[in-house]
């Protein structure tokens, strides 16, 4: 969470823990440049929620309640939280998805989302698409499938 908070601060965004309304995990307020997350969630849920709200900030979403905006924010969060080199190491070890997700500190759902959004597998080689934001890269990992 510390790295994520530093990242947010670098964007000029402040992050706050609060007791939010039931069913609300996080909120992004563009005008105030603030993210709120519900402090009653598990640590992994808190991290993903903050990253998700930063995704709304990145894409310029404003209080939108549509699935496309939510999907974009989820994909941004997964890319922000998952290190492709570490993923490649864990996959090469033959670990199960649940174990990989635990090692990466994300949910299995977040890992699956990242795999769908960021990985392309061709003839036994896995290619990772560039990450979002500054420092984009194109990375190739050879992974036995």
Image: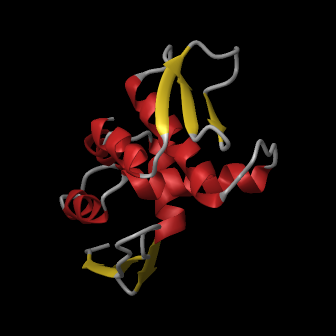
In front of the other: 98 or 53: 53
Rendered image quadrant of residue 75? bottom right
Q: Is residue 104 above or below residue 15?
A: below
Relative image position of residue 50 (x, y in whole percent): 49, 37
Give the left or right position of residue 113, taking residue 88 as reference. right
In front of the other: 89 or 58: 58
Q: Residue at x 45, y 67 (%)?
A: 133
Relative image position of residue 15 (x, y in whole percent): 47, 32
Rendered image quadrant of residue 98? top left
Residue positioned most to the bottom: 123
Relative image position of residue 34 (x, y in whole percent): 56, 36
Q: Residue at x 47, y 67 (%)?
A: 132
Q: Residue at x 18, y 58 (%)?
A: 93
Q: Residue at x 32, y 72 (%)?
A: 145
Give the left or right position of residue 38, taking residue 91 as reference. right
Q: Is residue 40 above or below residue 55?
A: above
Relative image position of residue 77 (x, y in whole percent): 50, 50
In front of the other: 129 or 26: 26
């Amino acid at each position: 969470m510390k790295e994520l908070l530093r990242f947010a601060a670098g964007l000029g965004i402040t992050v706050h823990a609060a007791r939010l309304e039931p069913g609300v995990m996080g909120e992004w307020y563009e005008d105030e440049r603030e993210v709120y997350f519900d402090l009653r969630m598990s640590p992994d849920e808190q991290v993903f929620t903050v990253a998700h709200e930063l995704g709304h900030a990145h894409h310029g979403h404003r209080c939108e309640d549509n699935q496309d905006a939510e999907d974009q924010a989820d994909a941004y969060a997964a890319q922000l939280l998952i290190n492709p080199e570490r993923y490649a190491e864990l996959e090469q070890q033959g670990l199960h998805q649940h174990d990989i997700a635990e090692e990466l500190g994300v949910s299995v759902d977040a890992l699956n989302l990242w795999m769908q959004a960021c990985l392309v597998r061709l003839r036994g080689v896995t290619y990772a698409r560039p990450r979002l934001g500054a420092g984009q890269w194109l990375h190739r990992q050879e992974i036995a499938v």
